[in-house]
Amino acid sequence: MIAPGETIGILGGGQLGRMIAMAAAQLGYRCHVFAPEADSIAAEVSAAFTCASWDDAGAMAAFAADCAVVTYEFENVPVGPLAALGAVALLPHPRALETAQDRLNEKRFVNALGGTPAPFAPVDSADDLASAVAKIGAPGILKTRRDGYDGKGQWRVMTPDDVGKLELPAKPLIYEGFVTFFAEFSVILCRGRDGDIRFFDSAHNVHEGGILAISTVPAPAAVLEQVPTARALAAKAAEALDYVGVLTMEFFATANGPVFNEMAPRVHNSGHWTIEGAVTSQFENHVRAICGLPLGSTGLAAKAVEMRNLIGDDAHDWQAILSDPANHLHLYGKAAARPGRKMGHVTRLTLD
């Protein structure tokens, strides 16, 4: 067990790291953030901050020497430089990063577990893309295998004629067929060092422009019918990866059951409602898990919960939001708003 008073290292300096650090402080831990960006909002609420490039082995080793355990707040942390962490425990294990960082590896991993991803094919050339579209059909979506998130690194292919119009980037890609679905939902679990697994209620997720806009709990009945199958797959993934911490898997609810979309080896935007809406938030349970503490209850603390992201440079009336006593406002402290940037979120609880 990592005792309160020790230091938790966080790789990455964004809002997820910020909320992990806030949950850790509540349990008596200090946090040390490592990020290449100087304007880290996670560092603002942490005890220490190392601003250095990922491949700065000396800085990484000095960071590790200050930490009793290290975790990460996003899945695009490069794996190679993490060898400089030495003997300090990195949780979840980097094999989860290696799996989730490459969409092709991720879908093959899910296939091997008996899950159902969208139809897919690797693409390394224009000829590969033409073959993939001929095999899978159109419409579909072409994605970079690495680094894309929130709709970035993606191109829609509506008809086979679109293939010749695309200028392919010089990086590995994957083509995925469109899935006919009636809802999107996520499965968020937390697995402790002792193998104990707890599931949070699955949120019904609505995306706008490829970015999560609203998550609601409980999900509609038609979605809830598919949650047990999705949870079984998520548990298999956690066991196969010997996972410790919060793991998220996103699904499409279809007429033929849940279809896997993406895996995030971390706390997740669709779980932000748990801060007020669950007995123990995803952030606190993540801290508990990596530190070897017993996991807290994931039960609902309200009859219903809605989480709405505050995205981009739209003006918001904070006084109006807070005038509703059922609202809980979370602002991330980002200095500059821009289109598509998550600036905060609002959680609204229905208590009766």
Image (cartoon, helix red, strand yellow):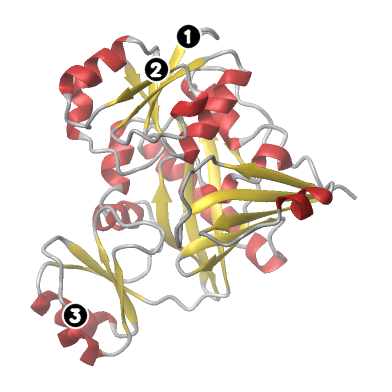
Residue that badge 3 annotates: 166
Q: Is residue 101 above or below residue 213?
A: above
Q: Residues within 10 Å of mark 1 (few under 14, many from 20)?
A: some
Q: Earlier in the sequence, mark 3 or mark 1?
A: 1
Report whether residue 87 is seen: no
Find disc 2 in the rendering and name its residue: 69
Which dot marks residue 6? 1
The foreground one among 156 and 257 is 156
Specify few, some or many for label 2: CA neighbours under 10 Å numbering under 14, 14-19, or 20 or more: many
Tell me which numbered mark, 2 or 3, is placed earlier along the sequence: 2
Depth order, front residue of 330/154: 330
| Left or right of residue 175: residue 311 | right
Q: Amino acid at mark 1?
A: Glu
Q: CA distance from mark 3 to mark 1?
A: 51 Å
Q: Which is in the foreground here, disc 2 or disc 3?
A: 3
Q: CA distance from mark 1 to mark 2?
A: 9 Å
Q: Residue at x 52, y 73 (%)?
A: 256
Residue type pointed to by label 2? Val
Amino acid, disc 3: Leu
Question: Does the CB distance between marks 1 and 2 fall below 8 Å?
Answer: yes
Are the two marked residues, 2 and 3, in contact with CB atoms closer than 8 angstroms? no
Which image quadrant for residue 148?
Answer: bottom left
| Closest to the observer, 309 or 147 | 309
Assign a secondary structure to mark 1: loop
